[in-house]
Image (cartoon, coloured by chain):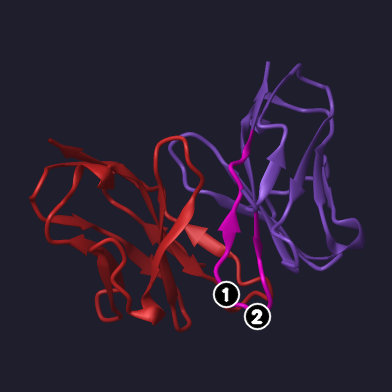
Amino acid sequence: AQRVTQPEKLLSVFKGAPVELKCNYSYSGSPELFWYVQYSRQRLQLLLRHISRESIKGFTADLNKGETSFHLKKPFAQEEDSAMYYCALENSGAGSYQLTFGKGTKLSVIP
Amino acid sequence: DTGVSQDPRHKITKRGQNVTFRCDPISEHNRLYWYRQTLGQGPEFLTYFQNEAQLEKSRLLSDRFSAERPKGSFSTLEIQRTEQGDSAMYLCASALGNPGNTIYFGEGSWLTVV
């Protein structure tokens, strides 16, 4: 069964410090991974997906199949990055291509 | 805002009552999902529609839950004989066309069963 693990419930960093939000997955097929973000009082929205290899709002994430990880990184945290971050794995074995989410990590950037 | 809209945003109901949530997906999005999210957890998949056809249901979707998407546009999620364990945020999401396209989420409907 597929599973997504985000080991940290809360991560606090100072403004300007590097950020790394951890995500590990378990999946038998070829994984498609995503990071979703939820800012305060806003809806869940896609931040980035590994297949596009984009950098969004300064965030990047690299898929490491050997370590089954997809950690989210940003070199210099900004106050506006404070939000809830969810790692998600697409189940391509199901016709729905549903997402399996981790429990989320709350990022708090201290001014 | 032309995103996914959900109604009502908040619902408080007594145990044993029935509740219905509505989701209006982004126009022309043929794929529609329902997820449930409880405190401290990520969203969990409930069910999936492609156009009007309900193609997948999670084991989380007990027989007290029913979802419809008549005419492949809006969708409803009904919970019959609510229980306190049904208290959660119910999220609707939609996507266009082929798998792999971005899934867009609504703001969710909060259900509290007292």
Q: Alpha carbon of mark 1 to alpha carbon of mark 2: how far?
A: 6 Å
Q: Quadrant of residue B97?
A: bottom right
At label 2, counting other C-alpha atoms closer than 10 Å, the crowd grade (few under 14, some 14-19, many 20 or more) is few
| Marks 1 and 2 close (CB-CB < 8 Å) | yes
**Residue A5 forms part of the magenta stretch:** no
Residue B65 placement (x, y as % from top left) = 80, 43
| Rendered residue at 91%/57% (across/down) | B70
At label 1, counting other C-alpha atoms closer than 10 Å, the crowd grade (few under 14, some 14-19, many 20 or more) is few
- Name above or below for residue A96 compared with residue B4: below
| Rendered residue at 60%/66% (across/down) | A98
Q: Nearer the viewer, residue A57 or B32?
A: A57
Hue used for the chain lettered B: purple
| Colour red belongs to chain | A
* Secondary structure at numbered mark 1: loop
Q: Chain of mark 2?
A: B
Q: Nearer the viewer, residue A78 or B47?
A: A78
Q: Amino acid at mark 2?
A: Asn
Q: Quadrant of residue B47?
A: bottom right
Region in magenta:
B93-109
Q: Which residue is mark 2?
A: B98
Residue found at the far right of this picture: B71
Q: Amino acid at mark 1?
A: Asn
| Rendered residue at 74%/62% (across/down) | B27
Please determine if labels 1 and 2 lie on a single subunit. Answer: yes
Residue A6 placement (x, y as % from top left) = 32, 53
Q: Is residue B69 left or right of residue A97?
A: right
| Most common secondary structure along the magenta stretch | loop
Residue found at the far front of this picture: B1
Circle number at residue B101: 1
Residue A62 placement (x, y as % from top left) = 26, 75
